Image (spheres, rainbow, N blue to C red):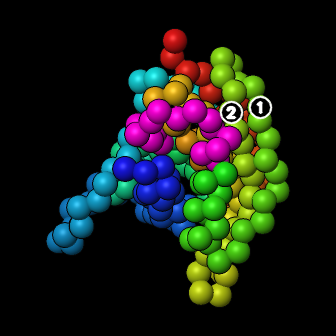
Amino acid sequence: MNMKYRISAVLCMVMLLLAGCSSKSGKNTDETLETVVVYQALPLPDIFVDIPESFEETSSQFYEKYYICEDASIIVTEDKNGPFPSAYDYSLSALEQYRSVANTLEVLSQDAITAKNCGIQMIEFNYTLGENNDTQMSTMVGFVTDGDSMYIITCKSNTSTYAEYQNAFRTVMESVMLAE
């Protein structure tokens, strides 16, 4: 499986989450859900991330575990189809995939930061979805690799509230630690 396809699959799932996947309510319904590939979310055995106390654990039909606080969410996924030589190269490919599914996309920053015991390639951007660009979101995405897996840390909220979460999202990125 080539890298572009793997990135596309992971990002399509993330974009569904970014567009507002609903969490499980525990109610029984008569609906039959399609079989959907579920990407492993936190906790992953090889990466540790500090989640702010204000975020609550939840799940959806796409993710068994992610975290929400009002309109903000944090999700960690893993692409196990390495080897991955560079988080930077992966992030550039991922950004192009985001561009292909968003109506508009404005990159705010692209940085390499140092977390607890690893380097993270981070991209921050605003984007719109929907026919009338009515869903305006802001996202901070971090990419870190141990060589065999690529971990994608996605923090997002509505653009109107992003400033309230931006420092917490940055703290999440700085807290990343790979298992040794």
Q: Residue furthest top?
A: 180
Query: Pointer 2: what residue?
Result: 120
Looking at this view, is 62 or 112 the one in front? Answer: 112
Residue 169 - label: none
- At x 51% / y 41%, what residue is drawn? 76
Residue 78 within the magenta-colored segment of the rendering: yes
Give the secondary structure at mark 2: strand
Query: Pointer 1: what residue?
Result: 113
Give how far across and how far down residue 90 sits, in percent: 60, 45
- At x 68% / y 19%, what residue is drawn? 116
Mark 1 is surrounded, within 10 Å at the Cα level, by few (under 14), some (14 to 19) or many (20 or more) other residues, namely some
Q: Cβ–Cβ below 8 Å for labels 2 and 1?
A: yes
Given the image, on which type of amino acid does mark 2 rest?
Ile
Looking at this view, is 25 or 59 the one in front? Answer: 59
Give how far across and how far down residue 114 sits, in percent: 75, 26
- At x 58% / y 41%, what residue is drawn? 153
Q: Which residues are magenta?
A: 77-91
Any part of residue 136 in sight: no
Give how far across and how far down residue 36 sits, in percent: 29, 59
